[in-house]
Each structure stands twice: as structure tokens, then as C-alpha cells.
Amino acid sequence: MLAVCLTFSSIAFAVDLIGGLRWPFWWVLAQAAFWGIYIASTLAISRNRKALFVVVPVVFLLIFVGGRIQSGLPSNKTLLGPGFEDIRWRLTMDGQLSIALAMAGFVIFLGFVVTQGLRHVRVRTELELAEKLQQTLAPLLAARNAGYEIHGRSIPSSQMGGDLLDAVDDGEAMACYVGDVAGHGIQAGVFMAMVKSAARTALLRPGSLEGLLADLNRVLFDVKAGSATYVTFACVRCRDAGRVEYSLAGNGPILHYHARSKTTSKLAMEQFPLGLFANATFQSGVAEVESGDILALLTDGLPEVEDTSDDQFGLERIGEIVARNTDRPLAELTEKLFAAVRRHGQQTDDETLVLVRAVAS
């Protein structure tokens, strides 16, 4: 509105040139203020038709009163007499060109604003959709059965990150996983939805994680339609007391805190990410767990956070924080981990963590 007010108020000075500088300068300033405020306020209330019925009569009244005042003002006749034809012609041309250029510039600028406004609305709508999709695909995770409790959290680096997490209880076993889809935005979000649907369906069926990852890999390879998208994946299935099956596909290691020895080990596997090769094969392993043991599944966004000296936070620091807070609720331990990472450096990638603790049945 301020831009509109200033643009249209400048017309009063162009009109003053066309009139041969006839009126006192204070009157020209008053005219500039009037027309600028009038046009801006008219645009501001143009969507309220009832207000126009009040504004329009007031404007006509002000124009009528202004005309009466102007007719009684002393005028500068020096440029209106003979001998000033060239000057008057020049002033008239300058004034008319000023008005024409101001109006043309305003129309072009208004078109630009409208175009960018529509583009902004589309982008904003896409971002809101992406944010809702992110909340659906990577919600705060909390689950528990007789032998295990699970807590997970994902913090995207933008409205639509590429990380996802989930936990599935099929009645006989509790399974959970973290995944990191290559890329960001709506395209990655749609692929994340495919991954989550396929993974949840597969985890509800009995079978080993080897077969699950192989089936999931084939499905994702077929649906990605030739794009370079792939998914790193880390999954554990807690079926028998004291035994946890795990498998990784292109993901970093799972940290295993041993409550008895108070040490931390890494469960690692060198396997291809999902969706990269159609006929890739996968293996799974078995970890022995005791009451109080904690498994930490995480994407690379957490350990790869760097400080001002380019020193990464690293898996060792994560393991140390877990070891110092084993008696804490998993939700509190999760917050401590994320807080420590944030003190270390700024977030540059999606950060996802799932904690699994064995509890006495």
C-alpha cells in the first residue's frame, strides 16, 4: 500500500508541470498526499463493497471542496503569458511522459507481483503439503510389548526431509526401522510413502529380514521408474527373548549398549541400499540382548554433524551419551542425544534416531 501511495502521489507533481507550475507548492503537496492515500486506500478496501459506498462519496466531496479551494488560490501567471510557449510545451511533455511512464511501470510491476504471488502460493501450498506428509511418514515413535520398548524421533532439515521411521507389532514380534531416502521435496516424500507402505506390509508377514529386504528392494526398484532414488535402511526384529534379528542396507551401524559389561559395540553390514540394483541379495544377523541393553538405529544426519572445526559428532559420542543415561526413560535419552548434537553443530541433514531397550518380561 505504501508503494501504491508513493507511486500515485508522484502524479500530482507531473500535473503541476503540465499546468505550468501555476499553483502554490503547498497545494501541490496536498494534492499528492490526497491522491496517493485515496488510490492506496481504495485498493485496500476493494474487496469490501460496502466500504466503497462510503469511500466514493467522501472522495467526490473532497474533490468538490478541493476544486473550490483551488479556484480561490493565487496562481503564478509568469509562465502562462506570451513568450513562454516553448517552456510550457516542454513542461507539458515532461508531465505527460512522467504520468505515462509511471503508469506503465506500475502496471508492469503489478503484473510481476501477481505472477510471483501466484508462484509463492503454489510453493507455499507444496511446502505445507510436504510438511504434513513428513509428519505422517516420520511421526514421534513410541511402542512397547512384554520384552521391548521403542522410542524414535526424526527431525527433517526442511519441510520435507528424506528420513522415515516406523515400528510394527505383528502380535508375535516387534520390528522397527529407520530409512533415509536420497533427495528431498515432494518427490522424495512420495517415494518415502511407498517405502513405508511396502515395509509395513512386509513386516506384518512372518519371515526373516533377509527376505524382507530382498522383496522391498525389488518393489522399490520397479516403482522408482528409472530414477536414481534409493533408500538406506536399518531394521531390527525383536521376536525371541534375548535374541534380536537385524539387517542393514547401506546404512551406518546399529549401536548396541551392553548393560552387563557397560560397553558399546557396533552391529554393521556392508550391503547395498534398497532400490539400487534389482537382484541385490541381503543377509541378516542375530544379536544376543539382555535386560537393560539398548539398540540405537540412526541415520547419518546425527553422527555427521560438524562443529566449527569440521569435527564430526561421531558414533562414539552417541554411544557415550547412551551409556551415561541408561536408567533414563527412552524419551528423555532421545532428547539428551539431540540436544548434545545441536550443541556440537548446526543441522545440515535429516536426523533420525530409534532406541530399542530390552526390558524384563
Image: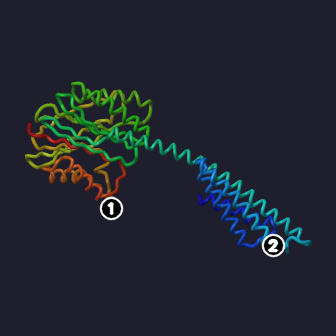
- Camera-side mark, 1 or 2: 2
Residue at the location (32% across, 38% down)? 232
Residue at the location (65% across, 58% down)? 38
Whole-percent x and y of residue 293? 13, 43
Label 1 Cα neighbours within 10 Å, binned few <14 / some 14-19 / many ≥20: few
Residue type of the residue flagged with mark 1: Ser
Whole-percent x and y of residue 132? 39, 41
Whole-percent x and y of residue 133? 38, 39
The N terminus lies in quadrant = bottom right
Q: Write down the residue under mark 1.
A: 309
Residue type of the residue flagged with mark 2: Ser
Q: Which mark is residue 41?
A: none
Q: Write down the residue under mark 2.
A: 75
Label 2 Cα neighbours within 10 Å, binned few <14 / some 14-19 / many ≥20: few
Element on which disc 1 rests: loop
284 is higher (above) or lower (below) than 157: above
Q: Nearer the viewer, residue 198 or 134?
A: 134
Q: Is residue 300 visible?
A: no
